[in-house]
Image (spheres, helix red, strand yellow):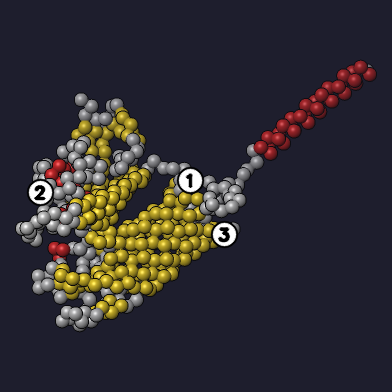
Amino acid sequence: MKEACAIANTILIVLATGFEAKAADVASAVQVKAPRFEQAYDWSGLYVGGHAGYGGGSFGPGTNPLPQQGAFFPRSITGLIGGYQAGYNLQLANKWVLGVEADISFTSPLDRPKLVPAPFSATFDYFGTARGRIGYAFGTWLPYVTGGAAWGRTRINLNDADGEIVGNKSRMHLGWVAGAGVEFAMGGNWSGKVEYNYIDLGARTYGLGDVPLPDVRADPQVHAVKLGLNYRLWDTPPWVAGNSAIKPPSLPESTDWNVHGQTTVIAQGYPSFRAPYQGVNSLPGAGRTRETWTVSAFLGWRLWEGGEFYFNPELAQGFGIGGTLGLAGFPNGEAQKGGAEYPKFRAQRYFFRQTFGLGGEQEDVADAANQLPGKRDIDRVTVTVGRFAVGDFFDGNSYAKDPRADFLNWAMWSSGAYDFPADLPGMTRGAVVELNRKD
């Protein structure tokens, strides 16, 4: 009996020990698998970005504002606008976000076909703002209000009887801006925003006493809607001593949109030469130097399976030597988009592309400008509708197709090729249907 009790006690001890071990394992497992509350999205940090949009408003009565190109919107005193911004956000513990931002916007080129001759006319060179921002973070969404100082440069052009510009005067304006917007995280360090600004630049008077015209009072007021894209650089500047801040978790990068860009600066000049016979279209005998500068963005969005939308906004500034006259083969192809002392904004390409796969073998598609990464059928039909360059689809010369990367001379990539429908920057509206087969 004593032996049986001893055996029973031993079994109970073993079972109890085993139970304790299991309980410890369970407790340990519970501790390991306890729910963790991940850190919320943090808007703090320095960022840079760009924007595109549309504006309108008035220069005041009697200023004869010049109509700027609106593309698919009505022409206005600004037309389409584009530019850059930079700022810094600080998110507080209570989810309020304080920030500062500065931006500069440039207007579209003149809508010449609809220009009405007048003795003088008003237009913008540029306008900018320096603003405070305050918003409340709803996770990856940040609605905010904004306001601060604004400045801009206006220009009064003096015209002859045919409407040609024969002189101009410029003035700087200082005023204020107020508005509201919403920003949203898009993945990685990228965020997008939609913003409205009301800009009052204050009145300036142009004295035209040197010509038989009355003084002109320019009082520009602008309503602007902007779509922006920002890239966050860091949370705390790296030069701050003892910086041990850890970046908040970023959203994963998405393959349903991409961003690419380019910028090109070209400077050309020549020394003085003897030119006993000169005309208005001759290359000036006095030596001179001119430059051009372009900045382009290539934005792509995947709308659904096989459906994609692309947008290529561009800023262009500068002049060709001799006003692009006096040379049979002009040496700077970028100058066809210049002709402005300050950058001008153009929408350039905007098109929808639908790919219909025909089945069978597939191929990889690399991430590139106007090309989203992924896979597609080798046998396919592709439909493209919108605004693009004919050279995007035909005459694919590898050496003389784009003056930003190939030969600069117009005779190599433009005049030396077949004629094709296009506006001045080389774009047109239309549709293309392509059939691709493996064989």
Q: Distance between the residues labelled 1 and 3?
A: 20 Å
* Identity of the residue drawn at 39% across and 54% down: 49
Residue 207 image-quadrant placement = bottom left
Disc 1: which residue: 251
Q: Looking at the image, is 105 positioned above or below residue 5?
A: below
Provide residue 389's location: percent of width, then percent of height: 19, 46
Nearer to me, 306 or 408? 408
Disc 2: which residue: 328
Q: In this view, does 186 lie to the left or right of 388?
A: right
Question: Counting residues from the N terminus, which is met first, the one under dot 1 or under dot 3?
Answer: 3
Count every numbered label the image shows and give the total.
3
Provide residue 86's location: percent of width, then percent of height: 42, 58
Q: What residue type is labelled 3?
A: Leu
Provide residue 82's location: percent of width, then percent of height: 31, 58
Question: Counting residues from the N terminus, which is met first, the one under dot 3 or under dot 2?
Answer: 3
Q: Which amino acid does label 1 sit on?
A: Leu
Q: Is residue 27 visible?
A: yes
